[in-house]
Image (cartoon, rainbow, N blue to C red):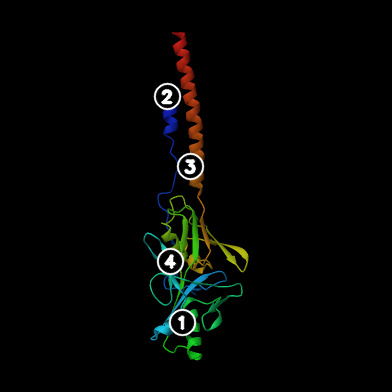
Amino acid sequence: LLWLLAIGILAVPSCSTPKEISYFQDLESVEGQRIGGAKGITVRPKDKISIIVNCKSPELTALFNLPYVTQRLGENTRSTITSGYSQGYISGYTVDDRGCIDFPVLGEVAVAGLTRDEIASVIKKELNEQGQATDAVVTVDFMNLYYQVLGEVEKPGRYAIDKDAVTILDAIGTAGDLTIYGKRENVKVLRNENGKMLTYEVNLCSAADLIASPAYYIRQNDVIYVKPNKYKAQAGEISQNRNFYLSLVGTAISVATLIITLTK
């Protein structure tokens, strides 16, 4: 009887997950609808960016670019510092609390609230108007912008922002998609907005709700949290109960075996 009980406990299913979990269940209703709020990532105080100016004159190119550092490997490893646009570790500009950077020759330049293209345009315009470089090509890149994906995804972690517009679908795809236990209808996005923590709820099952959400396009430092669904909670509870009853059955079997041995 005890052995039959043990087998019965082992046979209890770990959970009863649904066979189909669908995204965008109302996709046809938003066909052709314009997605709002598609503005790219804008720079904030404390962000770090690289700005590279390239022009025909090598002297001017060196003048407008921060040094970069390369490592020369050998018996005595040492760093060499060079100026100009080249391969290596390029120094960046950290945006101060007032939203400005200190750019060579031009001095203080306000960049907070601007996209990469807008910053490049401002720098190029200033160089041209001041007669410093009329043929400059300006390239701006992000250096320390990230978002985090936590909870029920295949690869939780922190991921770099490497393009101008990143959607929540991009972020979830980079993290390997939701697990079977991820709660698709209520994905949380935590965002620091002007010093205040805001929480948005995104319903991945509804395309209409998704594209209307302020969190459809994510920003630097956003935290995306996928909450476990009820089946994950049930699975955990069943697992704990199973372990308890298996332990109880094991103890009962041991006691019964000892009694049988002693009564022989």
**Mark 4 and mark 3: Cα distance apart in space:** 55 Å
The residue under label 1 is 63
Proximity of marks 3 and 1: CB atoms separated by less than 8 Å: no
Amino acid at circle 2: Trp
Check disc 1: other Cα within 10 Å, few if <14, some if 14-19, many if 20+: some
- Left-right relation of 195 to 155: right
Q: Position of residue 40 (x, y in %)?
A: 48, 73
- Left-right relation of 110 to 32: right
**Mark 3 and mark 2: Cα distance apart in space:** 24 Å
The residue under label 2 is 3
Q: Position of residue 51 (x, y in %)?
A: 47, 76
**Mark 1 and mark 2: Cα distance apart in space:** 82 Å
Check disc 3: other Cα within 10 Å, few if <14, some if 14-19, many if 20+: some
Can you tell which quarter of the image residue 90 is in? bottom left
The residue under label 3 is 235
Q: Of tags 4 and 3, which is closer to the observer?
A: 4
Proximity of marks 3 and 2: CB atoms separated by less than 8 Å: no
What residue sits 49% from the left and 46% below the top?
Answer: 232
Q: Secondary structure at mark 2?
A: helix
User: Residue placed farthest to the left in the image?
Assistant: 74
Which is more toward the observer, 32 or 121?
121
Can you tell which quarter of the image residue 163 is in? bottom left
Amino acid at circle 3: Ala
User: Residue placed farthest to the right in the image?
Assistant: 196
Disc on the earlier residue, 4 or 1: 1
Q: Secondary structure at mark 3?
A: helix
